[in-house]
Image: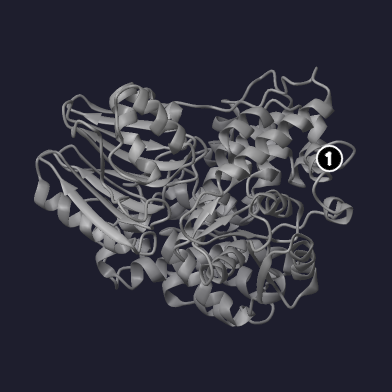
Amino acid sequence: MCGIAGQWLGGRTAEGEGFVRAACAAMQHRGPDETAVHTTDRVTLGVTRLRVIGLVGGQQPAWDTGGTVTCVVNGEIYNHHELRALLATRGRVVRGTSDVHVIPDLYAEFGDAFVHYLRGMFAIALYDTRRARLLLVTDRLGKKPLYYAETPGGGTAFASELSALMTCREVSRDIDPVAIDQYLSYRIVPAPHTVFRGARRLPPASLMTLDRDGTKVQTYWCQPFDGSLRATPPADIVERLDTLLARAVAERLESEVPLGAMLSGGLDSALVVSLASGHLGHGLHTFSIGFSSSAFDERSQAERVAAHFGTQHHSRLVDPAEASDVADQILIRMGQPYAFPSAIAAWTMYELASRYVTVVLTGDGSDEMFCGYARYQRLLASAHQDDLAQRYAAVLADGVPGATKDALYHPRFRTRLPDEPGHHLTERFARTLDSASELERAMQVDATFWLSDAQLVKIDRMAMAHSVEPRSPMLDHRLVEYARRVPAELNLHDGVEKRLLKRLASRYLPVDVVQRRKQELAVPLEEWLTASLRPVVIRTLLSEASLERGYFAPDALRRLVTEYRPEHSYALWTLYMLERWHQLNLDQHPENLPGECIASAPLTQAAERGQWS
């Protein structure tokens, strides 16, 4: 697991190397063990590495046998032993010892089709010297991130994290108003947007080619939910899911450093722990966190599962006094606004895990694949005469409600938005299968949007902030390919969520764990906002900088903050994290302000100059 960065230079090697070294320095948390930079006449590649496999001889960049293909990689290739054997039959002896060293020879042998041979999570930057060609590749589900931006003179800069990319001074820092609007609705900035107009995130399953002919992006894998297993007996489906999940867990146990697992006490993580324990025996490290509020505290359930499987369990209580400081760290690592309060819980859990292990297994991805969200039932209950995208937006958007946004927006900021800014989900539903059920279409939107842009972003940044590698067996792409064919009505039936997965889990887990009501990883936000967090939230949102930011009418913002009601909790947190991001990333660093702004120039002036374009 690593952080990678680079620049397609057009011959400007000195500038490119300076940026790449700065970007790697900004990502030392992703790879504290080794840093390397490689420069040619057209490209500079950099990597900061967390050693997991190939502790000796696993350095990057990696080269092919002929010495004409080089790459840097962030991720883990679980089938690298099989690929080494395959390449050996074709006369290729892989040079290095780590899992990612198979990639250059795989490309040299199979060209762009090499990506179809990979099982794992990855973001790859690969340079073909003979063809003067750079490839940027993301894994099928978007587990590993890659941000990029065009630079003057036809160049392209890229990095694993947005904050690292923004160390390139050639990247525009103008704020993207559409990204702000979408963030306020969904509490995240959906790809390919970032908060900066000049920077983009490469979507999942993307292969970007940069060469003398320009830049091209293609999608090499898709996962339409189609319910095509309707004629298959449910018992047969459960059997196949069992086989696929067991194999996925087993493949993710290879590590030359200590390995553990997250254990919330819920179904998904408990199932992963049970399968991992079956391979490793007693002694697996497991981790959970809890809160003083009993409604959000799962430690007792986690401890019961840990005792059942004989794990070495570790837990800790999250102190509300930590929340604002942790929120600041989250925003710094994210590089843009992000308002999932569950990130506070994730940050704390990965910090705990980092004291004992370097690799952890997680149960993430199950809700998107097996119909685990309560909002799916709300969607089915909504009025069917309305547009599906609008109906789903109503149950998915849980930041600042549309009517509240309209009341808050400053007139000048509103003019910078498209006439119909809610088109985001419409575009995504248009890419689903018309023949699929409404629920299956919503699940596909979640798998290509909510999963990659919200959940996997959180997992990657919170884990890597503490130099921990997270592995998610539920998101093995072979398991996903099969799960997408399972009819949605088999997963959600008579109000029972993840019905088939529970049948599978009953083979391994105590019945009370299987039947326990789902509890998402969450924090007692409403309680915190009425107590420990309230002073800092009020102070931040009613500061002079906030009131002059230019997004919101000052009087409207004052009213919302001072007349706080519990139902406004997520809206208030969303607004707070937006303002706090500005203060941490722009106000404290005047050189980062959009366009010609300086520290004393509020963004209302930027709006008047059209710098929200």
Q: Is residue 429 left or right of residue 599?
A: right
- Expressed as whole percent of the image width and height from the top left, the position of residue 245 reads 67, 39
55 up-or-down from 103: above or below: below
Q: Is residue 212 left or right of residue 504?
A: left
Q: Which element carries disc 1, helix, strand or loop? A: helix
Instruction: Please name the amino acid that badge 1 sits on.
Output: Arg
Query: How was the colour assigned to the protein in this rendering?
Result: one colour
Q: Residue at x 18, y 34 (%)?
A: 67
- Expressed as whole percent of the image width and height from the top left, the position of residue 165 reads 30, 53
Q: Is residue 592 left or right of residue 84?
A: left
Image mark count: 1
- Depth check, front residue: 52 or 548: 52
Q: Is residue 421 left or right of residue 62?
A: right
Question: Is residue 604 among what the camera can see?
Answer: yes
Q: Residue at x 79, y 20 (%)?
A: 230
Q: Residues within 10 Å of mark 1 (few under 14, many from 20)?
A: some
- Depth check, front residue: 402 or 36: 36
For mark 1, what is the residue? 503
Question: Is residue 450 among what the camera can see?
Answer: no
116 up-or-down from 584: above or below: above
- Expressed as whole percent of the image width and height from the top left, the position of residue 101 reads 33, 41
- Depth check, front residue: 524 or 535: 524
363 up-or-down from 333: above or below: above
Answer with the quarter of the image where residue 464 lies.
bottom left
Answer with the quarter of the image where residue 392 lies.
top right
